Amino acid sequence: MKWERIRIAVMLAPTLLVISILFFGSLLYGFLQSLGYNPNIGATDINFDAYLRVMFSEEFSGRFWSGLTLSLWVAFCSTFVSAAIAIFVALLLRRTFFGKKLAVFFFQLNLPIPHLVIAVGMIMLFSQSGLVSRMLGELGLVTSPRDFPALTKDAYGIGIILAYIWKEVAFFGIIVLAILQSLGEDYEAVAQSLGANRWQRFRTVTLPLIMPGLMSASIIVFAFTFGSYEVPRILGVGYPKMLPVMSLDFFLNPDLNARAEGMALSMIIAFIVLVLIFIYMYITARTVRKD
Amino acid sequence: MRRVPFYAAVIAISIAFLAPVISFMINAFAYRWFYPQLVPKEWSLQAWVRLKLIPRPGDRTLESFIDLWTGVPDVISALWLSLAIGTLVTGTSVIIGLPAARALGLYRFRGKKIVEFMIIAPTIVPPIAFSLGLNINFIRWDMALMNAGIPIDLAGSVFGVSLVHLVPVMPYVVLTLSGVFANYDADYEAQARSLGAPPWRIFWDVTLPAILPGLFVAALFAFLVSWSQYLLTFLIGQGRVVTLPALLFSAAGSGNNAMIAAISLVFIAPAILILLVTSRYLSGESSAAGGFGRV
């Protein structure tokens, strides 16, 4: 028994070592620096100055709160719209039809394509002289690029949300489609025989069945879209900036004092994500108990 | 019955999903593509010539192709570097992760939940939160190594970048493989042992064949996660490790859509290939699918 415990420890050690040193170690060091601890410049006392400056100082507070609002808005819209589209498409594609394999392949196509590439693709599709604008031009709805609304690099993060939708629909889709196919249509058939219409069947049978998978996927997507850097860097504007972009800009500022603010900002992002996940876990734990 | 509207919806949706890839294909070969033409009236390989991937018109012999490619144009060197880092990271993560996955898949032990949490944590915490501290840590460790007389650079080196790619890659490798081991019967190993097989033969002839399909999928996901890393490469590589995403990122600011699209096509080709190979393994139940969420 004791030998087995040692064996297990040895098997786990390399992985835990890599993650502890590179991930937890860095997270901890970043946290210390955000508290003003920086022995290289002789600062060893700990305080919350950087956090207070980022959130409440006249210089930064406007940027911070607008950035936080934008981040929440983008993460919420991306998650919700992607999930809705994915459910719709998965319901469409679950039946058997000629060409299903190809359709499902297209459905998954954007899954392995990096976010960065999809962001670049959004510029080509939705910029004022992009493919969509040309399509409307062909239809005579738009006569010059200026008539087409600025959907990329816009203050409301529309371009960012569009990029996330293209990516995350595929991510949600594969999860929802897998659940639907493993469940089959028996439950819905029963509901139908009891006189439930299409909407009632979806609302009371299908949706509750896919909900657990959908919720955990939503949390992953929300956390990712809230905290990731590439897409808002390519499709965002100078003001308001999503928090991860703002954080890196602080960090790369030649003024080394701004580094603590960048660190503080990155810790705030991580903190918000963790709080959301704990709320989610609390809610799911409660609902499971009720059942 | 209602076949026609159904197929119309499926086709419309498929085109929407394909739209980014279609836009790359048009942009990469478009020439003098004036607004509001939907399809360019002229096509050209100009962007590919400027990226030094295809020789100039009139000189497209095999020799000039070889000349051009042996000169290692930027895209090719970035491609090689991405492939090299991806392969190195994949190999290392599998070697490190395999025993951990086995421990998690086959045994129950005290603190298992904590171990699982530690391994999942890098997939939940936004990369920005640890990569800033990591950047400074690497610079500190470089100084310590230099003082100790060990001339290894972590910051700004391919080695350092490969090392940090392990952080986003390890969770998916370990989780995918622990799922494989959860369905694995270790009694076959005991039988081989009782017949006198040495440990390496047991691994090679018993364990490996049983886990090979799962191992293959885990490796492909690991490669894909490393392949698409930008932020970590940029912060740790300090702009000196120019992988394909780094190249695409700097091109993205240029406004030259034809070149951006051409680089994008080179960048996504292996990813789509991997999807073709793995699509039958994809299901919402497998943790491997989660790997895609981070790409």
Image: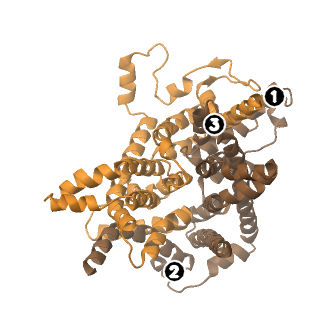
Chain colours: A brown, B orange
Quick check: B127 left or right of A13?
right
Q: Is residue A278 above or below residue A199?
A: below
* Pointer 2 residue: A37
| Residue drawn at x 50%, y 42% as measured from the top left | B279
Numbered disc 1: secondary structure: helix
* Mark 1 crowd level (few <14, some 14–19, many ≥20, 10 Å Cα): many
Quick check: A89 left or right of B59?
right
Going from N to C along the chain, the mark reached first, 3 or 1, is 3
Numbered disc 2: secondary structure: loop
Quadrant hosting residue A128: top right
Q: Is residue B220 above or below residue A246?
A: above
Chain containing the residue with disc 3: A
Q: Residue A273 versus residue B232: which sits nearer the camera?
A: A273
Quick check: A290 left or right of A262?
right
Chain containing the residue with disc 2: A
* Pointer 1 residue: A137
Going from N to C along the chain, the mark reached first, 2 or 3, is 2
Query: Which amino acid type is shown beneath numbered disc 2?
Result: Tyr
How many numbered dots are placed on residues in this image? 3
Select label 2 or label 1 by which is in front.
Answer: 1
Residue that protrudes farthest toward the top in the picture: B58
**Residue A166 image position (x, y, % from top left):** 66, 45
Q: CA distance from mark 2 to mark 3?
A: 61 Å
Q: CA distance from mark 2 to mark 1?
A: 57 Å
Residue that protrudes farthest toward the front in the picture: A193
* Mark 2 crowd level (few <14, some 14–19, many ≥20, 10 Å Cα): some
Q: Which mark is residue A96?
A: 3
